[in-house]
Amino acid sequence: MLKSSGAMAAATLLSRVLGMVREMVYANFMGDGMVASAFQVAFQIPNLFRRLLGEGALTAAFIPVFKEKEKTVGEAEMWRAANAVMSGLMLVAAGVASLAIGGITVALEAMQFGDETRLMLQLLRVMFPYMVLVCLAAVCMGMLNARGHFFIPALSPVLLNLVMIASVLFLAPLMGATLAEQIFALALGVLVAGVAQAAFQLPTLFHDGFRFHWQPPWHDQTVRRVVKQMLPGIIGIAAFQINVLLTQVLAFWYGTDGQPIVASFNYAVRLMELPQGLFGISLATFLLPALSALATDKKFDQFRGTLREGLGYLCFVNMFCAAALLALASPMIRLLFEHGRFDDHSTDRAAFALMFLAPGLVAFSVVNVLARAFYAVGDTKTPMRISVLCLAINLLLACGFIVPLRQGGLALANTLTSLVNVWLLTFALRKKLKKLDFHGLPGIVLNCLGAAIVAGVIAWLGADQWSRHFGHATVWMRIGEVFAPMTLAGVAYVGLSAALKVEAALGLIVLVRRKLGGS
């Protein structure tokens, strides 16, 4: 498990680091004002399809079927089924994108909008074809994951980040003199990135024997089965992503009072997604085909054990990350984003949101894993029902918190909703899998929480002392303000967790010793 998810984590780390570089370029280029908010809300809508399909519902529904075909009827039928799914999905995606672009065009011509809303809709119209491209990339990712390839699919987001960075640096200056004109360079970059992400995965698939042939999807049983499982999964497995989109749309219109809050919230989300993607999504992506194979073979004891062990490692890693994000919110935001149009006030606004998001990091990641456990046994309806309820709770909380806390209120609503989501998914999974053995997991969570609190206090005190004695006037001082206290806190966290006999801590120490050639 650690080796497979570790390979993915290495690729995801590269992607997320480049994603951070992309956000740094964004911050310097457009700050956190209204143009930035318009672009980020517009990008969230086609990007939601990337999250839902590339990291969620399509792969969750498709991989178990793909694995079952491979085991029961052979590779020829497996590739035929894949072609049928790909053909049907591309047709539907193209139809939805065409309707959306047409609807936006009619709305822009027939209705009066404010400058901010008009800019957002214009950007969205340019970027919506990304949905079609990401559908193709998602099917390729699902096939590669099912065939045991995790590294190459995890690298495809690297291309998105590289293209977007190049769009800001090279294309934006050619688009016009004002920021509102130059921002369209990023919209065009999204389309180029979609083509690159899909094309990047094809050589590995060809090497495995895949060849695309049009397969009429209309009456194909495999297509019907995947669609039946995928539709509820669009809501079920991506509650967090839908929450982010809905709250950002709410915040966009609430922030038209001259004090935009979408971009501040978005920068905080991006920073929190670094550890979530590095280990949470990597581990969840590995677990889906592994749990699916165990469910197909009726090895439910191993199914439960693998799930429990995965959750233990997930809590161990992300508990520390949550403590670090909470304790070092301002220094991290300052180091990464504070330059160009992103000033010290922008840092305060983004850090305020991050402090409310950080406590929910473990819950955000656990939702991904638990939802995939349901999908591995062919249940898509239970996560859907739970997520519908959580979406309603999130909207109510966001509406209540946004007035007093602004971007912090959005973050707090997401955190509380994800905690409720975890509790409901766990309760439902216990009922579905009789004798679901989480023995020892509550103790691991409590021990990790205690160690994380101590580590967070150490990090906060370390950053405070660094700021008092050295300040943060230069880049090197800002680097030290983040990494010096984080290193001290990390050593304390691993040591305290090992002393408390946390299995994940001991396992990681053994793994590191073996890699280093020790005994």
Image: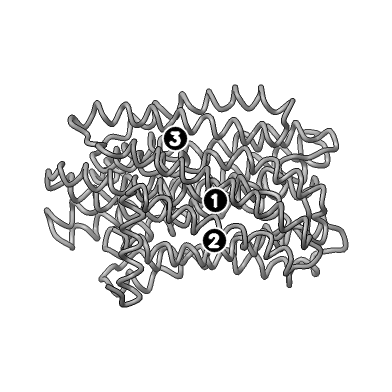
Q: Quadrant of the N terminus?
A: bottom left
Whichever of labels 2 and 3 marks the residue nearer the N terminus, that label is 2
Residue farthest right in this picture: 177
Task: Tell which of 365 and 456 is nearer to you.
Answer: 456
Q: Is residue 121 visible?
A: no
For the residue marked with disc 3, what is the amino acid? Ile
Position of residue 126 relative to residue 169, above or below, is: above
User: Which of the labelled discs sits on residue 109, or is there none?
Assistant: none
Where 408 falls versus 159 (above or below)?
above
Measured as percent of width and height from the top left, residue 401 is found at 67, 26
Place of residue 509 in the rendered image (x, y in percent of width and height, measured from the top left): 35, 62
> Closer to the observer: label 1 or label 3?
1
Mark 1 packing: few (<14 Cα in 10 Å), some, or many (20+)? many
Does dot 3 land on a helix, a strand or a loop? helix
Q: Which mark is residue 273?
A: 1
Label 2 and label 1: CA atoms lie apart by 8 Å
Q: Which residue is mark 3?
A: 235
Residue visible at 65% across and 38% down in the picture: 248
Contact (CB < 8 A) between labels 2 and 3?
no
Instruction: Say what amino acid the circle numbered 2 marks.
Output: Arg
Q: Which residue is mark 2?
A: 16
> Are there few (<14), some (14-19), or many (20+) residues within 10 Å of tag 2?
many
What is the x, y in percent for residue 429?
28, 31
